Image: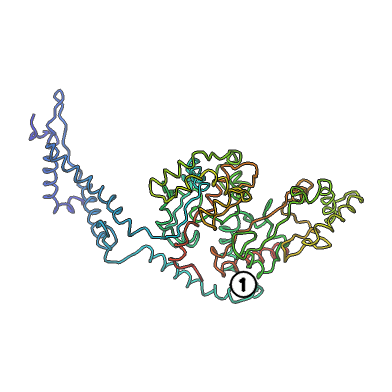
Amino acid sequence: MSVKDRDPLTGHQTTGHEWNGITELNTRVPRVVWFFIIVTHLWAVVVWILLPSWPLVTTYTKGILGLDQREEVAKKVVAANTDRAAWGDRIKSMSADEILENPELMARVNDTGHQLFGDNCAGCHGAQATGGQGFPNLIDGSWLWGGDTETVMETLRVGINSPHPDTRWAQMPAFGRDGLLPRGDVRMVVDYVQSLSGTEAPADRIAAGAEIFANNCTSCHSNDGTGNVDAGAPNLRDDFWIYGGDDEAMFRTIWAGRQGWMPAWEDRLTETERKIIAVYLQHARQDTVK
Amino acid sequence: MFKTILKPFSKFFELQAKTHYRVERHSMALTFGIILAAGVGGFVEIAPLFTIDDTVEIDPDMRLYTPLEQAGRDIYIREGCYACHSQMIRTLRDEVERYGPYSLAVESQNDHPMLWGSKRTGPDLARVGEKYSDDWQVRHLVDPRALVPESVMPHYAFLLDAQLETDSLPDRLWALRMVGVPYTDAMIENAGVDAVGQARPESDWADGVLDRYGQETAVRTFDGRTDLVTEMDALVAYLQILGHLTDLPQQIQPQAEE
């Protein structure tokens, strides 16, 4: 059997190979396959002409549409900013109270704020802004550095104990580990501080703890233990504890100190975005209080 | 219907069938055809490398990975973090708005291998540095779901107990210099102590890190453990430098200012 032979049933040529009398058909590629191969090739040629495509050793063909990914994204970002400026500029210039009373702007704040909070803040403070062990609850109204919009915006801008040059800075010293107070004294201070928020303890231990507290703690936490928002010193008379209010957690706090770290957002979020988050939180707090 | 559409092309099909059949039966013609087809693919892949001098931006102030960060990078690769996290912000509006300025080639010029990736089970990490606190990073690696309930990330608590192996660091830096990372002799020689010094701000070794890698280098007890320099120290140090090796992207791109 030679190459030219045709199979009598199908009319197709054979490959010319034969195994024990069985020959192999040389069936053609179906024409519909060819159709799509041709169409896609023609489309490729069109794209080569329109878009950047072929490398030319030290440069590449730019395409007659002159598209550039970097310019495209820059244009889109600018266009999006212009779209948002319609309400973004009003948020920037209005006071927090005015925004809170404006339902149209609040719809924007809650929509955008939810996104911004979820992407940037929820990792630590939780999706409901209720915080967790070591991360402050932003809903309960107990603010280390003050909770009005201006202050929250400033905290967002510079962070707390962050690498930002203007960062807010505060540190709870390690009274026990660094040898400022012996172990027994730390325990008595724990009893005293717990008594401030209503936990029972023997009166003599409270009195002794109060004296140690007066000598060591009042410069930051103030004489009555209500703290100082200018220094980021927490109020010890309320029932909000960032690191926990039980014996063990409080002993650890006073013994080994605490120094939280809130990142600075100046480089990541714009002023308007920071304001949206601050107003969003204030609104969330009002909802909870109601 | 296809038959009618394809009718004008019937000559072409005849020609193709004939030539293909003929080429198939001549070994040299087939070899030449294969080389030609593969050559196009090779050219398209290789030619862009000729333009590398023009396409990679130049930043003379580009910072190198410190030995601790490089060790963290090796742990990042060892644990397969790249399988779920990319390090490449693409030139798309949604990515620029979420993650920050799109990635530039220069940012990866000291990465061997680069970890751009394209699989994002978790978020992109190209600019995650300093976005979260060290404490958060450590606790998140120890138990991701304690902080992010919906997370599917595995936990890496064992890193906190694994002492960092520093003996091989000079060799690792030397190998990187072989492929073009400009580590100096002093950097290679002191790689081991620099790794420990960066995680021990109060030790004598900390100053050497600042001298060799710049005053901006973060020298901290990254994992909060003062008794041991762990693999957690290295990994968190690496995560905290991501996106901060150069500020060129912020300079050349329009800020998303409103």
Residue A218 locus on image (x, y percent): 81, 60
Looking at the picture, the colour scheme in use is rainbow
Residue visible at 60% across and 56% down? A122
For mark 1, what is the residue?
A103
Q: Amino acid at mark 1?
A: Pro
Instruction: Answer with the quarter of the image where residue B107 lies.
Output: bottom left
Residue visible at 41% across and 43% down? B175
A97 w.r.t. B72: above or below = below
Judge whether residue B161 can be spotted in this image: yes
Residue lying farthest top? A20
Residue lying farthest right? A204
Chain letter, disc 1 residue: A
On-image quarter of the C terminus of chain A? bottom right
Pick whichever, B148 or A215, lies toward us.
Answer: A215
Label 1 CA crowd tier, 10 Å (few <14, some 14–19, many 20+): few
Report the number of numbered marks: 1
Residue B114 locus on image (x, y percent): 42, 49
Image-based side of B37 in relation to B52, left or right: left
Residue visible at 81% across and 57% down? A216
Determine whether the residue tagged by mark 1 lies in a helix, strand or loop: helix
B247 w.r.t. A250: above or below = below
Pick whichever, B125 or A105, lies toward us.
Answer: B125
Residue B168 locus on image (x, y percent): 49, 39
Image-based side of A27 in relation to A283, left or right: left
Residue A158 locus on image (x, y percent): 61, 64
On-image quarter of the N terminus of chain A? top left
Judge whether residue B149 can be spotted in this image: no
Pick whichever, B25 or B160, lies toward us.
Answer: B160
